[in-house]
Image: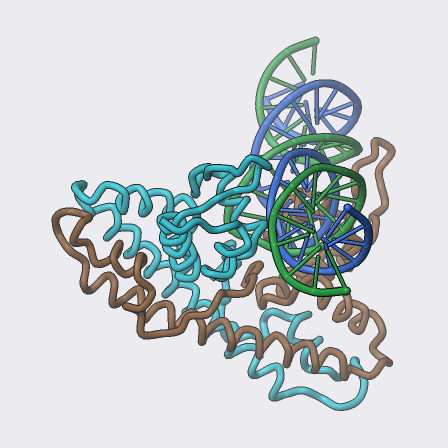
Chain colours: A brown, B cyan, C blue, D green
Amino acid sequence: MPAHTIGKLAKATDVKIPTIRFYEQIGLLPEPDRTESDRRVYDDKAVRRLAFIKHARQLGFPIDAIRILLDLSDHPDRACDDANALAQDQLTAVEAKIAKLQALRAELQRMVDAGCQGQAAECRVIETLADHSLCQHDHATPERMARV
Amino acid sequence: MPAHTIGKLAKATDVKIPTIRFYEQIGLLPEPDRTESDRRVYDDKAVRRLAFIKHARQLGFPIDAIRILLDLSDHPDRACDDANALAQDQLTAVEAKIAKLQALRAELQRMVDAGCQGQAAECRVIETLADHSLCQHDHATPERMARV
DNA sequence: TGTGCATCCTCTAGCCGCTAGAGGATCAAG
DNA sequence: CTTGATCCTCTAGCGGCTAGAGGATGCACA
């Protein structure tokens, strides 16, 4: 089982070193063995686990969902209903975000198209911001998006 | 000029009271007058300014951009190039986010479609997360998204 | 005139998911 | 033996709020 320093693990997975330590701190990654001088030592299992986490984060799964997914991955005998549900939730969330962003894009596009030269007094961008009634969409307050 | 309490301002603009105080603290809203007992008193100008801020936030403009936009709005004699540029930047950012989310949606859709019954060992969701090579898209690390 | 609830005040801490930096120890190559 | 890369822990900061403690007013109704 080849051993890696934290730096190698970081390179292998393209995850930054402080992020790896952060994942350890919040319990996503187990505490690794240490050398005599207290340096972390990782094996290939850690590489796979971190790659799993990274992939899930790229897909926008929140940390708590990843905890559950990792747990399932660790226990292949369990029912995977939770994994399906989480993926479905995430899909729904992503679709909602897309819909919202498309409405925003439409309005921004109108603002940009109407963009003026000259003074702020006649600026359509400013004007649009100042007067919501100029909007066509009812872009509701966006919810928190964390990372996508 | 009708005067409002912070509560009325909050209702008029649909912005929460702590958020109003927060905007004041970071200098987006000017410090309002106070009553003898130290309560904030707002006029209609404050309502308009807060509505402007809210609208810009809904469109995803970051606070620093809003500072500039407010400043332009306060000085109608200035050139509005900055406003146009900020709107264009925001449009570009939103388009990039949409593109990224659409790639994520596609992969999540495949995961969900392949969703299994039974044990995690055969779960396509888990499997896909564990093995990035099963993905079709090269969904890069998402950048920070703040609010939409 | 009391009373009781709504609203306001300030202050601090927390959310998510990292990221950055200080200040120091250790390793590995030349 | 030196030098520079890498590692360690710890704390604080990012954006944009949000929540809660603990207390002071304001206002309607009896």
Q: Is residue A13 visible?
A: no
| Numbered-mark total | 0
Nearer to the camera, B42 or B56: B42
Return the residue found at the far left: A118
Nearer to the camera, A69 or D16: D16
Return the residue found at the far bottom: B117
Q: Is residue A9 left or right of residue C3?
A: left
Q: Please provide percent x and percent y for residue A2.
A: 77, 52
Q: Is residue A142 visible?
A: yes
Q: Quadrant of residue B121?
A: bottom right
A139 to A26, vertically: above or below? below
Q: Please provide percent x and percent y for residue A114.
A: 18, 63
Tell me what residue is drawn at x 59 percent, y 52 percent.
A14
Q: Is residue B125 left or right of residue B42?
A: right
Tell me what residue is drawn at x 53 percent, y 50 percent.
B6
Tell me what residue is drawn at x 48 percent, y 70 percent.
B101
Tell me what residue is drawn at x 40 percent, y 51 percent.
B2
B91 to C29, vertically: above or below? below
Q: Please provide percent x and percent y for residue B50.
A: 42, 52
Nearer to the camera, A42 or B28: B28
Q: Please provide percent x and percent y for residue C8.
A: 60, 46
